Image (cartoon, rainbow, N blue to C red):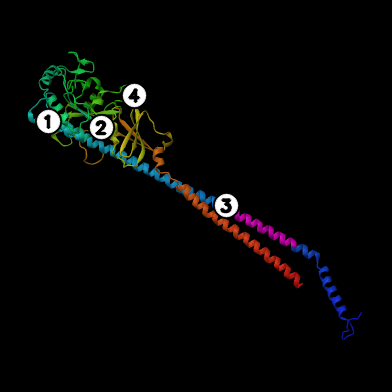
Amino acid sequence: MDSAPPSDDGSSSSGDDYNSTSHTESFFDERDPKKTDEDEAIAKTESRVVRIVRVLVLLLLLVVTAGVSYGVFYYVSNSETKSFEEDFQDSSTKVLDAVGSFLDHSLGAVDNFMVGIVTNAEETGSEWPFVTIPNFAIRATKLLSLSQASICGFYPKVSEEERSEWEEWALANDEWVDVSLKVQREDPTYAGTNVESWYPSSSISNNDGPLPINASGPHYPAYYTSPIVPVWSAYGWDLYQSFQQEIDEMEQRRSVIVGRTLNIPKSEQHTISWIEGMVGPDLKADEPIVPFYYPIDASASSGVAVANSEQDGRVVGAIAVTMFWRELLRNILSPGSDGIVAVIGSKCQDPFTYQINGPDAVYLGSGDRHDEAYNRLAEFSFLHDLRSSGKSYTGFPLSSTYCPYWIRLYASDTMRDSHETNNPLLFTIVALSIFMFTSAVFVLYDCVSERRQKKVLSVAVKSTAVVS
């Protein structure tokens, strides 16, 4: 076997290779074990810090996402609640103002009717209570239309001494009944029952029939009424016998009296049946009705605002107009403005409740039927405080002493539902989706970066090992 060629210095190449390999192995064998452990510890520490930071960032994104989502939901929901409350305030103010304007307009029509009666009595030289009203049926129909009332009546004041003479006079001058019935039959706006026959009355009467001769006065017998009541005589029924307190208060205060509400079950006044003959089939006759007693002042033609003057007038009769309470609450709000609950009452009677749905008023029944959850959202006023300011009404004021009526308005679920939408939830979902998408992008970026970093580190370690 041939030996390797000798080198210039006499050594062989195989000896050099052996020495080089021995030196490399000696280098790796001689690395400092302590230094290697420190590097591994530093690497583990940095990896742990990175993981902690990553978790903290994810938690922060989670908290921010939850906070922003809640904030969006709260803001949008609160905006709808604020809009609901503001709409209630605006609507309730509009309702109360409209009720005041309605009363001014209706009572203004009655005042004008009353002045016409007094003026005619003066021009014809008629003495009270022997007063006639020319063209009563036509004028009364127009009064009912303007005042939105269903019934009106003229009640002259008759003393005990005048009773017998007035009864004879009324019987001799009752031709107005046939004229009124003819006008009533031909009136296209009247939807009630038409009376084909009637019987004259020779005596002032009450609900039980003719009054005894010795019955104490004064009396307020009906003489002109519109429409003609289909169950009793057309005239002679004594208003004073059934409503003495109201008439006494009207005389003493020279003010308009809002009488006891009729047609409320559980009250002392039972549901009345005769009203069914005076309203059309499209109207509910079992809803509450209320009479207004307007004084007839013998000096009404002496000035524009006799009620506000200091002179002492003489009450010679009364005009009674009866209307459904719903008429005060209708045609106020626009369609879609639903859910205002109106509770009406006085200290003399139990309350009853309506719900105003746009231009309509729906009777809910007797008693206070509002939802107590909305006690905080309420508006209150007495009827006599709702008179509009200015010169719109110059007649007698509503009484503030005799069983004053009040009206209290509440919000309801119906009204709240019209303001609540899905916007809070939708906006919250959008905000949540944005933040979740952002978080997902961050996690994806972090994973990709970590994977890339591991690859780079692996290549660097291998390169270092090769170089070494």
Q: Are marks 2 and 4 in contact (CB under 8 Å)?
A: no
Q: Within 10 angstroms of label 3, few (less than 14), some, or many (20 or more) residues?
A: some
Estimate the spatial distance between the alpha carbons at disc 3 and disc 1, rounded to whole Å: 84 Å
Q: Within 10 angstroms of label 2, few (less than 14), some, or many (20 or more) residues?
A: many
Q: Within 10 angstroms of label 4, few (less than 14), some, or many (20 or more) residues?
A: some
Q: Within 10 angstroms of label 1, few (less than 14), some, or many (20 or more) residues?
A: few
Q: Is residue 442 above or below residue 291?
A: below
Estimate the spatial distance between the alpha carbons at disc 3 and disc 4, rounded to whole Å: 61 Å
Q: Are marks 3 and 2 in contact (CB under 8 Å)?
A: no
Q: Between disc 1 and disc 4, whose residue precedes?
A: 1
Closer-to-camera residue (317/24): 24
| Tag of residue 398 | 2
| Tag of residue 135 | 1
Residue 136, percent from left and from top: 14, 29
Q: In the figure, residue 372 lies in which quadrant?
A: top left
The magenta-colored residue range is 40-60
